[in-house]
Image: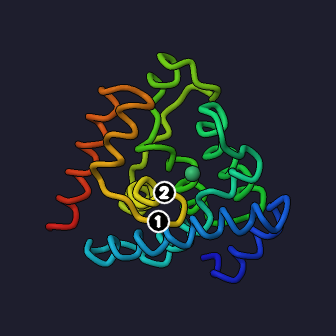
Amino acid sequence: MITEKQAIALLEKYAPDEKTFKIVYGHCQKVREIAERVARQIKGVDIELVKMGALLHDIGRFVYPPPGRDNGVRHGLAGADILRNEGVDEEVALICERHVGIGLTASDIEVQKLPLPKKDYVPLSPEEKIVAYADNLAIGNVEGTEKMVEQRFSMEIGPEYGERVRKFHEMVHKMMAR
Ligand SMILES: [Fe+2]
């Protein structure tokens, strides 16, 4: 498994400048904090994988920065490609590839005409789900609420996706209750 030091070195390698590095790294540290807290409440989760996935999940933002829907959609797969090229563990690359929103399905890509090869990018492992969950809660480097996340997606993508986000939150709570 990649170490924290190696993960930070990778972020530094791909960041175009110091200012962009600080913005992305600050967000990733907040995502790691939330994700680790959630991971510790779920049995059998690989905490180290969650932490490294959280640190690296937005490395694709250096290639596809905000704003805009298309860049928002592209940065997950772009980040996973970077991680694979760098020989980072496939489990970490998959966290990155599947973290956008609560995941995108081939149908989402078709219906919304998203700029991605048509397949599912949906978080499947507990570690993938936890990082996607934590990422949505972290607005920059500040933690918001689930309600805010549900309203944001409902406004940005539509009420149907907002409802899927609400169900995703319920599913994470069930994982924590077990
Ligand atoms: Fe992201």
Nearest to the observer: residue 96 or residue 73: 73
Q: Residue at x 41, y 61 (%)?
A: 134
Residue 1 placement (x, y as % from top left): 60, 76
Q: Secondary structure at mark 2?
A: strand
Q: Which residue is mark 1?
A: 142
Give the vertical position of 54 relative to 75 (above or below): below
Marks 1 and 2 close (CB-CB < 8 Å): yes
Q: Secondary structure at mark 1?
A: strand
Nearest to the observer: residue 165 or residue 79: 165
Residue 58 placement (x, y as % from top left): 62, 56
Q: Residue at x 51, y 44 (%)?
A: 100
Q: Which mark is residue 33?
A: none
Q: Is residue 117 left or right of residue 18?
A: left
Few, some or many residues within 10 Å of mark 1 (<14, 14–19, 20+): few
In the picture, the quarter occupied by the C terminus is: bottom left
Q: Which residue is mark 2?
A: 139
Amino acid at dot 2: Ile
Q: Quadrant of residue 133?
A: bottom left
Q: How many marks?
A: 2
Nearest to the observer: residue 161 or residue 127: 161
Amino acid at dot 1: Val
Q: Is residue 96 left or right of residue 170?
A: right
Residue 60 placement (x, y as % from top left): 69, 51
Nearest to the observer: residue 25 or residue 168: 25
Q: Residue at x 65, y 39 (%)?
A: 67
